[in-house]
Image (cartoon, rainbow, N blue to C red):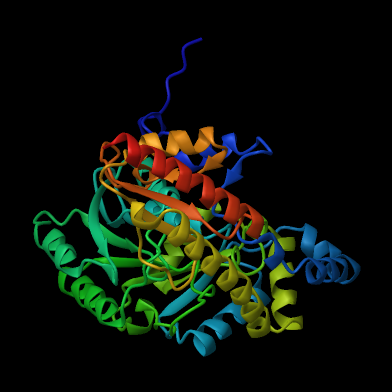
Amino acid sequence: MEYKFSDRIAGLKPSAVREILKSTSDPEVISFAAGNPAPESFPVDAIRKVSAEIFDEQPITALQYGITEGYAPLVEKLTEIMKERNHIGTDNDSLIVTSGATQVMELLTKSLCNEGDVIACEDPSFIGSLNCFRSYNCSLAGVPIEADGIDTNALEETLKNDTDHRIKFLYTIPNFQNPGGVTMSWEKRKKVYELACQYDIIVLEDNPYGTIRVAGDDVPAIKTLDTEGRVVYAGTFSKIISPGIRVGYAVGPKEILAKMTVGKQTEDVHTAMFNQMLVYRWLCEYNLEEHLSNNQAIYRKKLNLMCDCIDSELGDAVTYVRPEGGLFIWCRLDDRIDMLEFCKRAVEKKVAVVPGTAFLTDTAGTTPYVRVNFSTPTDEDIVEGVKRLGQVAKEMLAESK
């Protein structure tokens, strides 16, 4: 039988990251391609204890349907944390719990965009979100990033040229951007909000990595500037507790979140009750700041080790902006090194990296960059894997002479 797929799905390509991960099923392959948190950061014992408490004390609540907005105690707890810790949330805002932060992107797109509308995105950006936007037949307007975040001059030009007002929102990852690793400065965050007000668009502020800061000072969220109700903030417990539990959340204007809630009812009805209860009890019974500090120590060590190895093994063959946190380093290869060939030869040496083209808003675009992840591999694999990448780079530079 010949299958005819919808226009929305027919043009989508498999995630390049997921395809590359298939090669890592070989136990000999050292993977710098994943975006997984460090396994040693998971609070396994705490989760085991909290899980037992839930099924001892509230088994029916954990196994029964819940409301779409989220488990009420968790919603209340998150609202409190957002206001006290992040200074996010006004009387005009509400909070909903989602099945991972990626669902926030999907629900906002569903709520605001018609086919043919445009979403402005940092270029490069997170492939999962880009594919989400593409699945709604939205066009992507890529805006370059710089060492201190999005190029606000280019963003202003993009918005100014949108004479038919097709751009519905800007998607940005201000902290330790994926894949770029850069952090948007406070000055640029203020400028982004100013431009959003001037050109009447929504800002979708995605902050999955904000708690993994290993250097520098925290920068307030764009959402803290939101006096007009035009910023939707996406958060997640994927990098705090575990990605497998799929608990994220959105804070945003009540009117927008009400539409997103209706959209969620047609998808999964509500985020898994047990998972929400697990997060709530964990937040109540354990010290969040102590846990985050322990995780930051883990990532600081891994990031410093990988940067040291890159500097010693790859040298002038790559340049990069040293991230202050997150999970990734965005490496620009020397112009004499073909990026795709480099990725291919790396796999031949049993090392997986992600080609930078996977993160471009233009699927036909080219780039000299590759993304490497330092959170998932062991220290030993970081040392050995970067050594192999250095061998590939040296071979290709020698061939170019």
In-front residue for pair 154/60: 154
In the rendered structure, the answer to whether residue 280 lies left or right of residue 86 reads right
In the rendered structure, the answer to whether residue 114 lies left or right of residue 71 reads left
Q: Tell me if I can see residue 378 in this picture.
A: no
Image position of 369 with respect to 347: above or below: below
The percent position of residue 193, horizontal first and vertical second, equals: 26, 76
Outermost residue toward the top in this view: 1
The percent position of residue 63, horizontal first and vertical second, equals: 79, 58
Image quadrant assignment for residue 340: top left
The percent position of residue 151, horizontal first and vertical second, equals: 21, 66
Which residue is at a point 12% across and 56% down the rendered structure image?
162
Outermost residue toward the right in this view: 56
Quadrant location of the C terminus?
top left
The number of callouts visible is: 0
Image position of 168 with respect to 81: above or below: above
In-front residue for pair 250/367: 367
Q: Tell me if I can see residue 101 in this picture.
A: yes
Which residue is at a point 11% across and 62% down the rendered structure image?
157
Image quadrant assignment for residue 231: bottom left
Outermost residue toward the bottom in this view: 84
Image position of 184 with respect to 110: above or below: below
Image quadrant assignment for residue 120: bottom left
The percent position of residue 2, horizontal first and vertical second, equals: 46, 12
Image position of 7 with respect to 213: above or below: above
Which residue is at a point 68% across and 67% down the rendered structure image?
41
In the rendered structure, the answer to whether residue 169 lies left or right of residue 92 reads left
